[in-house]
């Protein structure tokens, strides 16, 4: 089964070294590489540590569930509501191509916007992509 470590790490603009640092260097970059390739399997404590560092649930990171179940979905919805926009209007402001179904999927945590869209959403919310991804 393919895990989502590399996908989320890259989406957040982290190197393996940076992700290692976010785990308090408990998980080395070499070990992260092995996890990402599927050569080794993290234990439960490590899954929990990586999930916390990547701001998602362990079940999502492992690939057991499709819902990100994190604060990003809530942050996107809050930005849209604060702007007083419908999902369609918000999608148009993000990039002119995102339709209401796409925005709904972001707000439900079913998928994440790509880097370009995340940057635009952060701009609309007067925040940074890093803050948007790591809000608690």
Image (cartoon, rainbow, N blue to C red):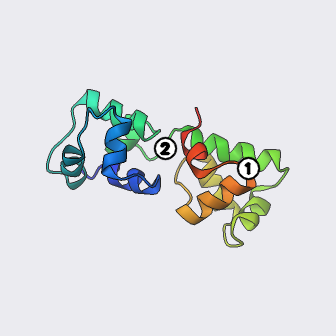
- The percent position of residue 13, horizontal first and vertical second, equals 45, 55
Number of the front mark, 1 or 2: 1
Look at mark 1 in the image and give the residue it sits on. Answer: 125
- The percent position of residue 66, horizontal first and vertical second, equals 44, 47
The residue sitting at 53% across, 38% down in the picture is 70
Q: Is residue 48 above or below residue 92?
A: above
In the foreground, 9 or 86: 9
Q: Is residue 63 visible?
A: no
Look at mark 2 in the image and give the residue it sits on. Answer: 68
Instruction: Answer left or right for 135 relative to 5.
Output: right
- The percent position of residue 21, horizontal first and vertical second, equals 35, 38
Callout 2: few (<14), some (14-19), or many (20+) C-alpha neighbours within 10 Å?
many
Q: Is residue 28 visible?
A: yes
Residue ranking furthest to the left? 39
Callout 1: few (<14), some (14-19), or many (20+) C-alpha neighbours within 10 Å?
some
Q: Secondary structure at mark 2?
A: loop
The residue sitting at 55% across, 45% down in the picture is 133
In the foreground, 41 or 67: 41
């Amino acid at each position: 089964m393919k895990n989502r470590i590399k996908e989320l790490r890259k989406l957040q603009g982290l190197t393996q070294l940076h992700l290692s640092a976010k785990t308090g260097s408990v998980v080395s970059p070499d070990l992260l590489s092995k996890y990402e390739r599927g050569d080794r399997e993290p234990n439960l404590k490590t899954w929990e540590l990586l999930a916390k560092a990547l701001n998602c649930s362990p079940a999502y990171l492992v690939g057991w569930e499709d819902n990100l179940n994190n604060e990003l979905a809530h942050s996107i919805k809050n930005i849209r509501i604060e702007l007083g926009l419908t999902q369609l209007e918000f999608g148009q402001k993000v990039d002119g191509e995102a339709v209401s179904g796409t925005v709904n999927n972001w707000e439900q945590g079913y998928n994440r916007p790509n880097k370009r869209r995340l940057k635009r959403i952060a701009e609309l919310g007067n925040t940074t992509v890093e803050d948007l991804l790591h809000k608690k």
